[in-house]
Amino acid sequence: MTVHSPTAQHRSVPLRANAPRLAGQWARRAPLLPALVFLIAVTQLPFVATLVISVLRWNALDPTNTGFAGLRNYLAVVTDANLRSSMLNTAVLTVAVVLASLVLGLLLALLLDRRFLGRGVVRTMLIAPFLVVPVAAALLWKHVLYNPEYGLLNGVLTEVWRWFGSDHPPQPDWISGMPKLAVEAALVWQWTPFMMLILLAGLQSRPIEAVEAARIDGANAWQVFRYLTLPHLRRYLELGGLLGSIYIVQNFDAVFTITSGGLGTANLPYTIYQTFYQAHDYGQASAAGVVVVVVSIVIATFALRLVSSLLRNEAS
Amino acid sequence: MKRPGRTIAEIVTVLVAAVVAFPLYWMVLAAVKPADEIVSTNPRPWTLRPTADNFVHALTVQNFGRYLLNSVLVAVLVVVAGLLLAFLAATALTRFRFRSRTTLLVMLLVVQMVPVEALTVPLFFLMKSVGDVAPAFGLNHLGSLVLVHLAFSLPFAIWMLRGFVAAVPVELEEAATLDGASRFRFLWQVLFPLVAPGLVATSVLSFIHAWNDFLFAKTFLISGSDIQTLPLALQAFVKPDQNDWGAIMAGSTLMTIPVLVFFVLVQRRLVSGLAGAVKG
């Protein structure tokens, strides 16, 4: 977890012994209160509301027929083939994108963690995809790269085939041919820079003395990476994996833009959006929302375990 | 003397960077290409006839200027309100000791962990009710977006600022108190300027959060075309029969520029800020 020893900061707290105890306690909390109250009002209370709505029979198209539904909405979520496939899609999408961008991000961070001419420019170029507005990035991939007629990918294929004297290059229709991979590739392109940034911060905080000592003792580059760098990066890998999972589980822009949830790519955010805005089934949409929370906690835990166990094996 | 392995690694890095950034180059290129070149079946990686037509078209015909203003308004309000709230909260969490402080810290993380799709339904109704009391913050108003983005960017902002506040030596506060400064004065005249780098990094993240949002805009702004934000407007450009690719790419370019500029300005601080968030 990213909760790191808040107790360590108790030391830095100045003593205020003369203040009346109870009043003092609240005066110290006071600066925190505006943010806290606001957060509870906008994020926690609605979640409680979601829990309540999820056990109600409430469809706006059938307003007279409302009431307590028990676990029927959840049953519908779990048995509905569409929802089940969108649940699976969400899990696959999240795990695939997070793992791929973590690995690629680690490689790029290692490459960038040394001085060379033009490093600043190269770093900015590598970070740039993360800075593109997600909707714009999705539009870019869908129409400018994947388009079968005038897209960049097929343009490159045509060019490469021409070098070898062929006039009949393959011109695949990327999105309908491999819809899931198309969405994943666009997301990995956007999220790798984020992982790279976090891991780069980790690499730069690595104690250089230990590395030098290991080198003097005759460790090669791989050994230094495996026994020093990787264990040091563990927290950063975890942070990247956790934040990445949180964001990808919620991804709506890419799925909505690239495939409009068609071709079997609908994930939970998209399905909930549809249940809410097209089917107007508030109860079922809320139940699906609760399932998302559970799924994301499971995924985050699973991803963290995986990363930690990998590192533990590496270190032993 | 360099080892050959290093040189190869550097060449690989530069090549990878070129491939990764190429789609962006392509986006900007499409924005300045004349219309007939964009949909050519034989795309060329340059243009001999650069034009500003696409930008003019996006800003005037597609009313992009208005949406740009909407997006800026939402993002700026989120950043300003977020800075004040996060600064106060981070100070309290770092500097003051009180019961359940750790619990509150963990709670902030939990808030961040709840996926937005679990909240869209009740938030929709919440905004509907808010609209009955304060119409400017209700459905179909930009204020509703300010409220949700503020809520979703605060936890991370507080976590990040904590590291910066903790880095300011406690002795400074003691000295200020001895010199007769009230706690209020210390907060705004000493601590606030000292954590400015952290505030900058934090506000960039909050800005990007609000600037990028599509789901909430799509959920809360249902009717009324002149209250849309940029991501919504960009989507609306895409029409099944006739797509104005030049204008769409010009719009995408315009949207990316502010984020890019901010980021380049605070790059270094952001990396140290992330490192600070990990170290706690």
Image (cartoon, coloured by chain):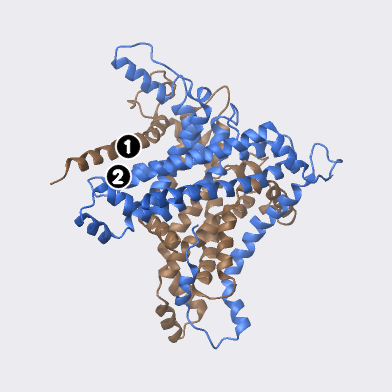
Chain colours: A blue, B brown
**Image position, residue B133 (x, y; %):** 74, 57
**Image position, residue A185 (x, y; %):** 46, 33
Q: Which quarter of the rendered picture does the C terminus of chain B lie within?
A: bottom left
Q: Is B2 drawn above or below residue B273 in the view shown?
A: above
Residues packed near mark 2 inside 10 Å, few (<14), some (14 to 19) or many (20 plus): some
Nearer the camera: disc 1 or disc 2: 2
For the residue pair A316 and B255, the one nearer the viewer reads as A316
Tell me whether circle 1 and circle 2 mark residues in contact (CB < 8 Å). yes
**Image position, residue A258 (x, y; %):** 53, 31
Q: Quadrant of residue B237?
A: top right
Distance, label 1 to label 2, CA atoms, is 10 Å
Amino acid type assigned to the residue bearing label 1 in the image? Val
The residue wearing badge 1 is: B16
Q: Chain of mark 1?
A: B
For the residue pair B82 and B136, the one nearer the viewer reads as B82
Work out whether residue A242 can be spotted. yes
| Total numbered badges shown on the rendered structure | 2
Q: Residue at x 59, y 77 (%)?
A: A27
Amino acid type assigned to the residue bearing label 2 in the image? Leu
**Image position, residue B183 (x, y; %):** 51, 79
The residue wearing badge 2 is: A111
| Left or right placement of residue B19 versus residue B151 in this view | left
Residues packed near mark 1 inside 10 Å, few (<14), some (14 to 19) or many (20 plus): some
Secondary structure at badge 1 equals helix
| Left or right placement of residue A56 versus residue B123 in this view | right
Q: Chain of mark 2?
A: A
Q: Do marks 1 and 2 share a chain?
A: no
| Left or right placement of residue A309 versus residue B111 in this view | left
Q: Residue at x 59, y 71 (%)?
A: B100
